[in-house]
Image: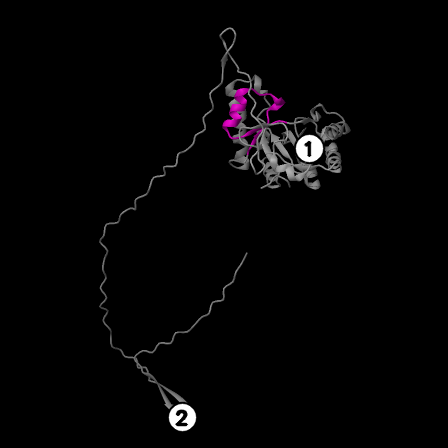
Amino acid sequence: MRRYGVLTAGVFGVSALLAACTGTTRADVIDDGSIQRVSTTVATIETTSTAVEDTTTIVTDTTPETTPETTPDTTPVTIWQPPPVPTVLGPTGAPMKPPVVRPAAAWLPNGVPAPGSMFRDLAADESLAPMGPVVALTFDDGPSQYTTQIVNLLKLYGVPATFFQLTPQSQQRADLVRQMQADGFRLGVHTKNHVKLADADPGTQIDQIVGSIDQLEAITGPGTVRCFRPPYGSYDQYVLDLVASKGLATAMWSIDTLDWEKPDWFTIVGRVLNGAQDRSVVLMHDGGGDRTATILALPWIIQGLRDRGFTFVAVC
């Protein structure tokens, strides 16, 4: 599915079967050259009291019952294992985190980011070429009490979007999450507790990334989560390795509205309209604080971008 947004009746004939028992039925056809006369005589059926001995022999199958052999399922079961923690030796010989090697942006032909890739805009997505200028709206830190208003506005204007969720909040609003999924919105993970992952130990990184995937897919279904967005844009090499090992892409952004600073709504509008370019990914928030200004800005953002010839698409 691209990201932008029985009964038959039979007539049964019933035929009668006529049976003649212990009687005679005969048809005599007399041909006089011009007239054909058919006469039928039915003999009277007499009922007799003669008992008919049933000589049917009942044969008992004495073959021992056997259980059919079954072929064991030899399909290998893949159990996810965390990748090894990368380390290098520092100048003093002590282990230290290695430098980050950012994976390239890549998309599958159906417009889904390739597993293990990383992107900040949609420039590498060749499937968008026929559409002209496009832009993607994304929302972080929900779901919250503001999410429904944002979703309703997007539905009213027919705009697809992607939501990167803090999954304990997803669990608290599971019905809303399922409805968002049914309405065609894309859902990604944003950790459990908005942790700055570059400063976290590997165990915490695993819990925050893998645990959040498990929590969201428990609501939306296995294999439905395709993207991860790191809080604060904070990551290290192990974060990227973990995301790739789970078959997800790392989703960043190219326009930050800074709506988390709670500016006036028209400031948010200006940041989007002034910064928008073809294939931009816009970062806004539907949780993490008062999002009234974001809600007020959204219709102006949508109309302003449409007036400039943009089409909206979702990511992930």
Which badge, 2 or 1, comes first in the chain's sequence?
2
Nearest the eye: 123 or 170: 123
The numbered disc on residue 214 is none
Q: Give the answer, above or below, for where 291 lies relative to 237.
A: below
Q: Which residue is mark 1?
A: 278
Q: Which residues are magenta?
A: 225-252
Work out which quarter of the rendered image holds the N terminus and state it: top right
Q: Residue furthest top?
A: 92
Secondary structure at badge 2 equals loop
Residue 130 covered by magenta stretch: no
The CA distance from mark 2 to mark 1 is 97 Å
Q: Is residue 212 visible?
A: yes
Sort mark 1 into few (<14), some (14-19) or many (20+) by Cα contacts within 10 Å.
some
Q: Give the answer, above or below, for where 9 lies relative to 32.
A: above
Q: Which residue is mark 2?
A: 33
Residue shown at 38%/76% (left/top)? 18
